[in-house]
Amino acid sequence: MIKGLCITPPVLGRISIGKAVEKNGRRLPEKDDQFTITSQVQTPDGWAPHPLDAVYRTASPGNKLRAIPVTVMFSQPDLNLRTSYCFFDRHAGRPLCNGNGVTCRRITHEGITDLPCPGPDTCEFGQGQCKPYGRLNVQIDAADELGTFIFRTTGYNSIRTLTARLHYYQAVSGGLLASLPLELRLRGKSTVQSHRTPIYYVDLTIREGTTLEDAIRQAQETQDRREKGGFDQQALDQAAKAGLENGLFEESAEELSAVAEEFFTTNYDAGTDPSPDKLNNKIQRKLQKPNSKNLEISQL
């Protein structure tokens, strides 16, 4: 295994609740009120839909895809959903600092450095631009038992809800999380901060029409069948953990454009990804002016 290369679950496609739209020559992220399942192929019109999108959309009321039947690959919640506080270079989608509220890994003019992480509210380096970032891998089509679809989010509501659900289901099922029949569900809410307009977040529930008790019984049957067939869930979790810990940052160079387009106002061009020297010079200028309120993240 190549050291420094983060080995993530194999990805077959993406799940999003938004899209990038063209406005005044710039591609801007735009929220939606439904899921979209895309492939990993990007065309001039955006990400090409995955065939499963049409399958589940046709079966949804009004063709609004707001629920997707899924399972998770790992029995440990933190392997399915990786969360952190992250500070991004908005132009390249490159993570510059990644922390957990206690420690962080940050790109500095001296290289990648381990530093204390005070969290986004008091971090001088982030200057209010650091935000929670979550990556959830789920399985939709049982045809590929080791392939997943990835949902990325910077939303507090989605991250908090998904984290709670995964840990609760793991606990209440007696460790059978990877065998439970689950469902990604889009929910809406209004708050004072949203000016009473709906905002949408992602929840993870037991599949519609199934009680929790029935789901646990099904999970136990699935687990027993897998064990008889030689399936080693514990070994799979260990392999996944080792792969994720092998790298410094999870996103590869090929994924930077997807991250930038999905979350940031940018005219990102994969051919203009800043060189390491140029990026280091920009980081060094920021480090020399940690309290400057006029330096926007988009200038990095």
Image (cartoon, helix red, strand yellow):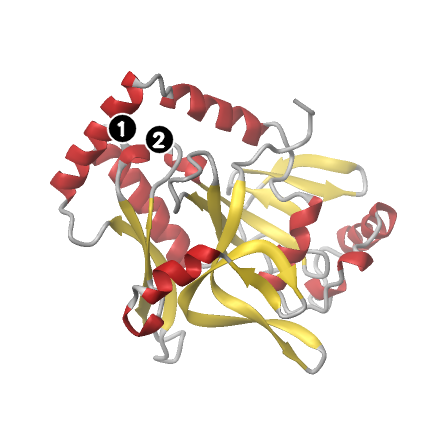
Amino acid type indicated by mark 1 = Gly
Dot label at residue 75: 2
Q: Residue sitting at 37 percent across and 19 percent down?
A: 232
Label 2 crowd bin: few (<14), some (14–19), many (20+), radius 10 Å = many
**Sequence-wise first label, 1 or 2:** 2
The outermost residue toward the bottom is 24
The residue tagged 1 is: 175
Residue at the image point whose x is 34% and y is 79% from the top: 196
Depth check, front residue: 29 or 183: 183
Where 105 falls versus 286 (above or below)?
above
**Taking 94 as reference, is 260 above or below it?**
below
Question: In the rendered image, which quarter is residue 53 located in?
Answer: bottom left
Q: Which amino acid does label 2 sit on?
A: Ser
Instruction: Measure the alpha-carbon separation of dots 1 and 2.
Output: 6 Å
Task: Count residues near mark 1 (Cα–Cα under 10 Å), then give few for <14, some for 14-19, many for 20+.
Answer: some
Q: Where is residue 224 in the image (x, y as percent from the top left)?
A: 23, 22
> Quarter of the image containing the N terminus?
top right
**x, y percent for residue 263:** 58, 62
Badge 2 element: loop
As rendered, which of 120 and 153 lies closer to the eye?
Answer: 153
Give the percent coordinates (x, y) of residue 276: 83, 46
- Mark 1: which secondary structure? loop
Residue 275 is at least partly visible in this image: yes
Q: In this view, does 299 lie to the left or right of 168?
A: right
Please say if 282 is above or below 110.
below
Q: Which residue is drawn at 68% across and 60% down?
A: 90
**Is the C-beta separation of discs 1 and 2 under 8 Å?**
yes
In-front residue for pair 28/226: 226
Q: Is residue 95 visible?
A: no
